[in-house]
């Protein structure tokens, strides 16, 4: 009986240690590195939330149809360490962006770079493969 209890406790301990490793996703699970898009639009929402910061950009195509792109960046801490603060990007800003489209929902993308109208570019905080500035 003691042996079974010991095995149960050890198994539970290993499960608890392994769960966080499984919780985080790899880039290739959600995004397609072969589907790179270059678009421009207006920021509609900025979320400084963990585990990933998100910027929502309304992009209007040639037919006048608007699509909201959900751009994933790194954690807010990684974005701050790369030099951007909360005042740097806000709703209403016109931006250009390069991103890797989602595999399931194309407009849910991993941002590779975001450029503000003043020319400042933010790159490499999405975890995208070979993204400039990615350590």
Image (cartoon, rainbow, N blue to C red):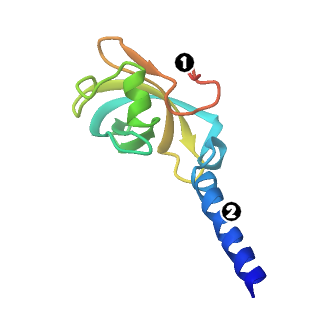
- Answer left or right for 1 relative to 97: right
Residue behind mark 2: 14
Q: Position of residue 73 (x, y in %)?
A: 45, 35
Q: Residue at x 33, y 19 (%)?
A: 116
Q: CA distance from mark 1 to mark 2?
A: 35 Å
Residue 115 at x, y percent in the picture: 39, 19
Eyeballing the image, is 105 above or below 112?
below
- Residue 133's disc is 1
Image point (56%, 33%), residue name: 127
**Quadrant showing the N terminus:** bottom right
Image-quadrant location for residue 33: top right
- Residue sitting at the far top: 119
- Crowd band around label 2 with a 10 angstrom C-alpha radius: few (<14), some (14–19), many (20+): few
> Tag 1's secondary structure?
loop
Front position in the image: 120 or 65: 120
Give the residue drawn at x 22%, y 25%. 87
Q: In the picture provided, is 5 more to the left or to the right than 51?
A: right
User: Percent from the top left, x then y, of residue 27?
Assistant: 62, 42
Asked whether the beta carbons under mark 1 and mark 2 sit within 8 Å of each other, the answer is: no
């Amino acid at each position: 009986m003691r042996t079974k209890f010991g095995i149960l406790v050890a198994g539970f301990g290993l499960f608890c240690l392994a769960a966080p490793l499984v919780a985080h996703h790899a880039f290739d699970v959600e995004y397609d590195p072969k589907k790179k898009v270059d678009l421009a639009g207006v920021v509609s929402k900025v979320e400084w939330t963990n585990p990933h910061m998100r910027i929502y950009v309304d992009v209007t195509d040639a037919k006048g149809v608007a699509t909201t792109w959900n751009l994933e960046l790194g954690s807010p801490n990684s974005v701050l360490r790369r030099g951007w603060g909360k005042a740097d990007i806000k709703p209403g800003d016109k931006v250009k962006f390069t991103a890797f489209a989602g595999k399931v929902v194309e407009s849910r993308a991993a941002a590779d770079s975001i450029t503000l109208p003043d020319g400042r570019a933010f790159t490499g905080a999405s975890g995208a493969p070979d993204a400039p500035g990615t350590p």
